[in-house]
Image (spheres, grey):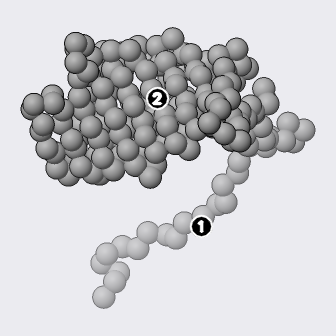
Amino acid sequence: MKQNTGIITALLCLISFSSVAKVDDLKQEVKISAASQEADIKNNQIIFNGPVEVVQGSVKINADKLRAFTKEGSNGRILVATGNPATYSQIMEDGRPANASAKEIRYELSKRTLILKGNATLEQDGSQVTGNQIQYNIEKQQLIAESTGSERVITIIQPENYQDESKPKTDSNKETQPETKPEIPVEPAVNAQEIE
């Protein structure tokens, strides 16, 4: 099958993915919680059965199953999360969230790279890239999206004033009047001795 490749890096300045990832996240420990786990010591891998949650700073991955292993001749840990879909989220330096989903999410910790495979989507602030595979370098903010066969890479870019329009509008022509509270009648106090 012929692959059509769309390099989206040049569009990053147009869409919101140009926000910088939190550098602190990449220095945090990785915590994995799962329903159960199996260790394959011979092949240097651990399989976590779901639901599985991976947390590294503000990075969160949720999956049905996770495989953690180290490539031979390398000390870089690789996490492969699978699900229907598996999801990834991270809070960027400016406080805005970035979200991704795919049937498989491969997170290479030493390379700081995400590879999303199968119905892959990466989204931030309403802007979105979808394709069969998306490779995203978290640290360098570089993205490559690919499709296979007749499928296409789809990019949706929100208008510049998208954030402004999503906020509730106020009528600037109205004069603001001080809020008046209705007066509540006060009953005279009753002396306890008068009640029999």
Amino acid bearing label 1: Pro
Tag nearer the camera, 2 or 1: 2
Which of the pair 70/49 is nearer the observer?
A: 70
> Residue 8 appears in which quarter of the rendering?
top right
Which of the pair 139/160 is nearer the observer?
A: 139
**Residue 185: numbered disc:** 1
Q: Residues within 10 Å of mark 1 (few under 14, many from 20)?
A: few
Residue drawn where x is 31% and y is 75% of the image: 192
Residue drawn where x is 29% and y is 41% of the image: 66
The residue under label 2 is: 115
Q: Rounded to the nearest whole Å, what is the CA distance between mark 2 and mark 1?
A: 68 Å
- Tell me if residue 13 can be seen: no
Q: Earlier in the sequence, mark 2 or mark 1?
A: 2
- Tell me if residue 4 can be seen: yes
State how many labels appear.
Answer: 2
Give yes or no for contact between labels 2 and 1 (Cβ–Cβ under 8 Å). no
Q: Position of residue 27 (x, y in %)?
A: 30, 15
Q: Position of residue 9 (x, y in %)?
A: 65, 16
Amino acid bearing label 2: Ile
Residue drawn where x is 15% and y is 30% of the image: 43
Outermost residue toward the bottom in this view: 196
Q: Residues within 10 Å of mark 2 (few under 14, many from 20)?
A: many
Which of the pair 158/187 is nearer the observer?
A: 158
Would residue 2 appear left or right of 119 to someone viewing this image? right
Outermost residue toward the right in this view: 173
The quarter of the rendered structure image containing the N terminus is: top right
Would you place residue 58 above or below residue 176 in this image?
above
